[in-house]
Each structure stands twice: as structure tokens, then as C-alpha cells.
Amino acid sequence: MKVKEIIENELKYQQQQLKLIPSENYVSKGVLNAVGSVMINKYAEGQAFKRYYQGNKNMDMLEELCKNLALQTFNLDPDKWAVNVQAVTGSVANLSVYNAILNPQDKILAMSLFHGGHLSHGWKLPNGKKISFSSKVFNSSFYMVSPKDYRFDYDQIEKQAQEEKPALIISGGTAYPRQIDFKRLSEIAKSVGAKYLADIAHEAGLVANGQYDSPFEYADFVTMTTRKTLRGPIGALVFCRKEYEDAIDSSIFPGLQGGPMMNSIAGIATALEEAQTKDFETYIKQVRKNADTLAASLVKRGFNVITGGTDSHLILIDITNKQPNGYVAAEILEAVDIILNKNTIPFDPGSPWRPSGIRLGTPSVTTRGMKEAEMEVIAELIEKTLKEFTADGDIKKFQLKKEINKNRHIFEIKKEVNDLTQKFPIYND
């Protein structure tokens, strides 16, 4: 099989799927064209107007435009805030902040991965094993949600911060569905002499249009990826108070990277232009409506939605009253082209490979034009699929797929899913 065939097959595959993974989306044709443009041919090591190679006039103009668009999108004063658009991923964006302001062995206090945080926030296993690069360089500890309601207890976080005396406090991650209190975390950070980093990789598009509270008034640094609710390509933005601009720029280059991916920056700039339009405002409001509708519909069908709902685009579910674990549930749903991911839940008795939860979200289906009525249908399809088949929680993947293929009802549900997705093409031409 050739590359072209694989790409064509992937387009068909994406078209037939109900993609519910909250960290994915569909970019516009404009973003696709920008990422696939001649900007990929140029190596632009250095900062805009301070390159090490010749011939970067257009690269300089593009990067400066992208920075300006980023500040405009989040309504930031360029005299108070700066942004770097070169980080190739969110993890690199976060590392750039650590590299800029911390020394080895400095303390980080962040959200636990099992309670919604991210690997790049100094994650290490409960047994102390350091599995992320940041945990090997810095001393990290983690705050957790309350076992009573699976929401953060900020008084407890403050007490922990006073005990730990971290140099940096981090919020944000991958699976916390509720609004984070940026103001309170900023106050906690200041009370112990720490800096505050708000990672809004997931919520960036929501923040840009007032559908999720903004951290900019309170944080020293704000990082985000561009591929999720911003509907851009893979890439990241690092915002900082103006006094940290030089430190962040030099932290990314030459500290962590060589030349930036200028084609990706072109795609990010395109996505930021789109994020300032009325169409995007309508879109992101619908993302929230769809998330609320989908969560409520799943609750109505007996699903154990963590915290009972969501304040963002993502929903976390304890699936163990429906299936043995999230791994089995995600595999069964993939068989009918409903794509979501297994996920740990707070205080999970399972493992990351066999967790108790699943995670789903509404950015991609909303991009396709689906609204509240379709969310009800999706909840019904998820319920119907998981009722049709149950497997042992430790079953091997190939055995599970073999058993699924014996169930004729699974293929009937898959046709229902494909009939739905056919009505909402990703691209119209």
C-alpha cells in the first residue's frame, strides 16, 4: 500500500466515524492548505527578524502575524503579554516554562494525572517511579479532587502548597470536566511565593469566546495546544507576562528546539484568524450546548458521569456499571465506529491500561454540524452498543475483536452510526 492510498483510506475512515475523542478535531480546508504549503520548505532557526539563516523575510512576517493574532484572539494587551508560537507540542510548551524559570530539583505542584492532569506536569507514579522527563528534573507533587464530589477542594490545595512550598503551581490537563478556579489558584501561588502556569490545552477555544473562564488575569504563564477546541494543526502557544518574554523565547530556542515548523505556524495563524469570526463563536457555543446535552442524555440512560456533567467540552464516565472497564468499552464502541478513549477516573482501582473510565467530547461532531438532537442519538447508540456485548475485563485485544465480530447486532448498529455520519460530511468537496 502506498502513502496516497493510506491517506485516502484515513479520510474515508474519519468520514464514517463518530469521533468523540475530546483532544481531536477537524481543521478547515484553509488550515489544511496552510500546513501543506511551501512554508514547509524553509528552515527558520531563531526568532522573527533574528534568524540565523538568510531568506526568511516571509517567515518573519508570518510568525509576527501569528503572534499578533494570538494576542488578539485572547484580547491581550501586547504591552503586558507576549506569546511564542514555535513550540511544536503542548509538552514542549510546558517544558519551556519550566526551563525558563526553574532550576533542577525545584518543586512543582500540579494536578494528579489520575485526577485530570497531564504527563508533562511532572508526572510520576504513586510508587515514586519517574516516567516523565519533567519529573526526572524537578521535584513534583500533586493535588487531587475531593472523594466527595470529584471536584477540587481549594482549601486543601492551599494547605498542600503551604506544606510543599513549590516554585511553580500548575493547573490544567486532560480529563477534568469542571471549571477551574484560576483566581484561587493564583492567590494560593502568590501566598507561597510560587509562579502560576495555567495549561488550557483543552479549553483554549472555549476561553477565546467566553465559554470557559479565562486564566489570563491571574496566571503568570498560559500554555495551550492548537489542535483541540481551537481547530488548528498540531502545535502550541506559550503566553507569558511581558517580563518573561526573553526567557521563554530563549528557553524554546535554543533551549529545547531548533528551527520551528513554519508550515504548522501558518496553520495556527489561519486557525486564529478563523477563531475571531462569528462562525467560530457560533461553533464554540454549540460545543458547550452539545456537551451538556450529551452528558445529560447519558446520565438519563444510567451512565455514571463523573461530577454529573461538564463545564467544558469533555465528559468523563465511570463505565464499570456498564462494562468491566474502559478498555473493553472503548474497543466495543470502536467496532461500531464510535471513537472515544479509555481513561482513568479519580481514585481508580484499575490501571492506565485497564482503567475504570472512558472519556468523550463534542468538538469534532460539532465541527461536522451536529447539534442537540444528534447528541441524543449518539447517547442512544452508545447505550445500545454496550448492551449488546460484554467481555471479560482481562481479555486480549485480538480475542475481543474476534468475539465482537461474531455479534451480528454490532454490525447493525455500525450501519446506524455510518448512516448518521453520512449526513454530516467533514468536507463538502
Image (tube, rainbow, N blue to C red):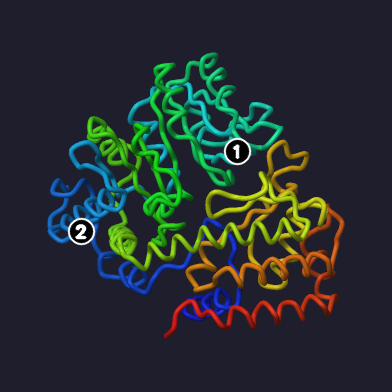
What x and y, as percent, mark residue 180?
51, 38
The answer to which image quadrant residue 149 occupies is: top right
The Cα–Cα distance between marks 1 and 2, rounded to whole angstroms, is 36 Å
Question: In the picture provided, is 255 more to the left or to the right than 391?
Answer: left
Given residues 239 and 248, the one toward you in this image is 239
Q: Are marks 1 and 2 in contact (CB under 8 Å)?
A: no
Between 260 and 72, the one nearer to me in the picture: 72
Q: Secondary structure at mark 2?
A: helix
| Residue at image coords 43%, 65% | 283
Amino acid type, label 2: Leu
227 vs 220, left or right, is right
Instruction: Relative to 373, say whether 351 is above or below.
Output: above
Who's the residue at 40% across and 61% down the image? 233
Q: Residues within 10 Å of mark 2 (few under 14, many from 20)?
A: some
User: Which x, y percent locates residue 190?
Assistant: 40, 20
Q: Position of residue 173 (x, y in %)?
A: 52, 42
Numbered-mark total: 2
Horizontal side of residue 366 vs 153, given as left or right: left
Residue annotated with mark 2 = 62
Q: Is residue 193 left or right of residue 374?
A: left
Secondary element type, mark 1:
helix
The residue carrying mark 1 is 113
Mark 1 belongs to which amino acid? Leu
